[in-house]
């Protein structure tokens, strides 16, 4: 394999990988505060892309993206308030079914609002055929945007959880809900906030990836499956692990093309998911001890 | 008549004994036939349609369903066919072959339709080909794969142009440009698979060599890696991409992003301006064969299709505020063919089938149809025109590559 080809595969892998990582982190944020997997996570990505495309004719690109992220955050908050907040100690299974329902509902709403056409935002820099050379390989500048924005998001999120008081309160709810209540934290607000945060992250990822991957009303499901795989692979609730696992899966997928036919790409990621579930159910980077203490 | 047929059916089903039941069933059937009779006299021409209105092939089924609704409303506004109104029943299969099968059975057995238009995709059509044939119900598929009408099933027709003709058009052009070694990319739908097969089968005839081959999922959102793999093969002189999915625009984009200025040929599945819009500048110069609908306004006035094409384009775009695509045209053709056949054969499945085989020189959106007992597609290679993309629009290809 030449260096050129190696770098080309590597960048393709990093691009897929950062998108998977963002979706996985969205899963993790909600999992940490509620203990459930929100299967509507992929729909937030779709909404971000769709809303920004709709807003674009009326305002400049950065504003359209900002507003789309805000609107998706509001949608995330509404979903939590309407469907989840009023449930008192629901079972894990019930919560999962509810989020799957929300995912289907959002998708159907999207097909009625936007129709079945594919849409995309314009490239942030240059156009569809602009490329830059990296070590002999050619990549689109948008790839750097995706990787950069995802990186900044992960760092900001990390700082938010480590340094701000709201971030610490959210972590407190994740660690021990009862103890958090005793300290005067309202866990219900923290749950709403976690939906808002993951909706916002998903939407922003949906905007930056839209020029590369296009947006359609039903892209959410595929992303949710990949994101879920990555979240499990990295250890549920572990955001650093999600980033590493996301990049790993993306790069494995990209390089697999050189060995097996392209058609097996998805089979590989599902095989990895199954393998992890059998061998290390707490994920590559998760703690087995901590996983045993959790309900799900 | 209805009463007789029901009695026959009852006798047939219950004939293995249970004589007491028979008389009761017969009485019930007699009562039922009284209720059914008036409906039969009104002679609604029932046309079923199985289309992928939602799901991964919605860009086919969506325009097809909207086209059918528009043209059936038109026919009924003009007093129907032979004075009988057309009743259109559209079923959304979401491109799912299992759903297509159950809808086909439902339309044939419960709704007792005269004919079925669709399905939108080749995979679905192949699943219900035998069902339509066994039930002796004319099926006018809007899907492209050649296997639908080869071998010929007496009740199964299709309106899109032949895959093999599209392949021949592309190979002819490649011969002119002196391109020999080609990489073939195809999606994993029935259309993509059938296209890849035809490309491989016809290649030796034109001295073309397929040196790389990949198939991708319709839902793939980035194909940089396979494009890199193909690019690494220095033999490749051109790319042929065979797909009906949005992923075909991604292929084009990823090739250009790899800084690779190789000629790209697409199938007739590229005939939706949406694919050009999302591929943007990368779509410029893509060469593909397609029906003349896309360049209706530029056709010479003596073209037999011109009037119909411009009319359809105008009406569709005024009504639905979206660009017309060749896919909607396939449903249009199916309905035009059915209308012409019902005018001859009346509301009778077998007579309509025979009438379709007799249709000659009927202009449609895909070309001028002339059917026969051996040819259930009715189109020749002339139905295609090589096109390219210039400044974000489809234009006739003039052979210079620019």
Image: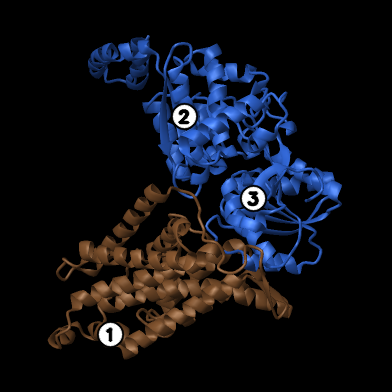
Chain colours: A brown, B blue
Residue B254 position, x and y percent, is: 64, 63
**How many marks are shown on the rendered structure?**
3
Protein chain holding label 2: B
* Numbered label attached to residue B70: 2
* Numbered label attached to residue B392: 3
Residue for point 77% across, 44% down: B202
**Where is A250 relative to B172, above or below?**
below
Of the two numbered discs 3 and 2 in the rendering, the one whose residue sits closer to the viewer? 3
Q: Quadrant of residue B89?
A: top left
**Which sits in the foreground, B310 or A29?**
B310
Asked whether disc 1 touches disc 3, contact meaning CB atoms under 8 Å apart, the reply is: no
**Where is A40 relative to B72, above or below?**
below
**Which sits in the foreground, B362 or B44?**
B362
| Residue A287 in view of the camera | no
| Residue B358 in view of the camera | yes
**Where is B126 relative to A288, above or below?**
above
Of the two numbered discs 2 and 1 in the rendering, the one whose residue sits closer to the viewer? 2
Left/right placement of residue A82 relative to residue B63 reads left
CA distance separating discs 1 and 3: 51 Å
Left/right placement of residue A238 relative to residue A165 reads right
Determine crowd level at label 3: few under 14, some 14-19, many 20+ residues with C-alpha closer than 10 A. Answer: some
Determine crowd level at label 2: few under 14, some 14-19, many 20+ residues with C-alpha closer than 10 A. Answer: some
For this orientation, the residue located farthest to the front is A59
Residue where numbered disc 1 is placed:
A171
Q: Sequence order check: which comes first, mark 3 or mark 2? A: 2
Protein chain holding label 1: A
């Amino acid at each position: 394999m030449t260096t050129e080809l190696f770098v080309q595969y590597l960048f393709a892998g990093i691009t897929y990988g950062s998108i998977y990582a963002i979706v996985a982190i969205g899963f993790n944020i909600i999992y940490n505060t509620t203990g459930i997997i929100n299967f509507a996570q992929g729909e937030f990505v779709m909404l971000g892309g769709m809303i920004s495309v709709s807003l674009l004719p009326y305002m400049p690109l950065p504003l359209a993206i900002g507003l789309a992220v805000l609107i998706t955050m509001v949608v995330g908050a509404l979903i939590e308030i309407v469907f989840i907040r009023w449930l008192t100690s629901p079972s894990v299974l019930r919560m999962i079914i509810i989020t799957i329902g929300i995912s289907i509902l959002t998708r159907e709403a999207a097909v009625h609002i936007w129709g079945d056409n594919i849409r995309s935002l314009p490239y942030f820099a240059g156009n569809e055929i602009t490329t830059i050379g990296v070590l002999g390989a050619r990549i689109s500048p948008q790839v750097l945007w995706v990787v950069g924005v995802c990186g900044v998001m992960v760092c900001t999120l990390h700082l938010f959880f480590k340094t701000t008081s709201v971030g610490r309160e959210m972590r407190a709810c994740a660690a021990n809900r009862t103890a958090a209540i005793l300290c005067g934290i309202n866990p219900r607000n923290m749950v709403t906030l976690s939906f808002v945060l993951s909706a916002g992250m998903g939407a922003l990822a949906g905007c930056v990836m839209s020029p590369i991957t296009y947006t359609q009303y039903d892209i959410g499901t595929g992303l949710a499956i990949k994101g879920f795989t990555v979240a499990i692979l990295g250890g549920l609730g572990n955001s650093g692990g999600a980033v590493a696992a996301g990049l790993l899966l993306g790069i494995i997928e990209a390089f697999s093309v050189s060995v097996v036919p392209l058609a097996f790409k998805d089979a590989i990621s599902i095989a990895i998911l199954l393998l992890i579930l059998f061998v290390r159910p707490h994920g590559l980077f998760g703690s087995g001890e901590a996983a045993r203490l959790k309900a799900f | 008549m209805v009463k007789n047929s029901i009695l026959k059916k009852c006798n047939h089903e219950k004939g293995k004994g249970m004589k007491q039941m028979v008389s009761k069933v017969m009485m019930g059937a007699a009562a039922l036939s009284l209720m059914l009779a008036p409906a039969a006299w009104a002679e609604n021409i029932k046309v079923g349609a199985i289309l992928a209105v939602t799901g991964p092939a919605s860009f086919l089924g969506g325009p097809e369903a909207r086209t059918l609704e528009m043209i059936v409303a038109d026919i009924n506004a003009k007093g129907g066919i032979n004075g009988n109104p057309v009743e259109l029943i559209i079923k959304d299969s979401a491109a799912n072959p299992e759903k297509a099968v159950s809808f086909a059975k439902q339309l044939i057995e419960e709704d007792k339709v005269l004919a079925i238009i669709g399905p939108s995709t080749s995979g679905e059509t192949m699943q219900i080909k035998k069902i339509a044939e066994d039930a002796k119900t004319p099926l006018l598929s809007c899907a492209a794969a050649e296997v639908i009408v080869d071998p010929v099933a007496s009740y199964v027709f299709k309106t899109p142009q032949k895959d093999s003709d599209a392949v021949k058009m592309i190979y002819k052009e490649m011969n002119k440009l002196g391109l020999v070694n080609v990489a073939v990319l195809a999606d994993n739908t029935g259309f993509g698979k059938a296209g890849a097969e035809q490309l491989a089968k016809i290649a030796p005839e034109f001295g073309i060599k397929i040196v790389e081959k990949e198939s991708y999922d319709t839902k793939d959102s980035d194909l940089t890696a396979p494009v890199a793999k193909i690019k690494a093969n220095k033999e490749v002189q051109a790319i042929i991409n065979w797909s009906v999915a949005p992923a075909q625009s991604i292929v084009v984009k990823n090739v250009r992003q790899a800084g690779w200025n190789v000629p790209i040929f697409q199938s007739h599945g590229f005939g939706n301006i949406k694919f050009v819009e999302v591929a943007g500048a990368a779509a410029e110069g893509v060469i593909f064969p397609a029906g003349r609908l896309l360049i209706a306004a530029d056709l010479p006035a003596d073209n037999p299709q011109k009037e119909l094409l411009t009319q359809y384009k105008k009406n569709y775009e005024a009504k639905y505020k979206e660009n017309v695509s060749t896919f909607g045209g396939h449903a249009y053709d199916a309905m035009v063919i059915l209308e012409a056949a019902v005018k001859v054969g009346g509301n009778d499945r077998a007579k309509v089938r025979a009438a379709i085989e007799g249709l000659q020189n009927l202009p449609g959106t895909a070309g001028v149809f002339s059917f026969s007992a051996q040819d259930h597609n009715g189109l020749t290679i002339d139905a295609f025109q090589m096109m390219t993309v210039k400044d974000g629009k489809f234009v006739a290809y003039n052979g210079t590559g620019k």
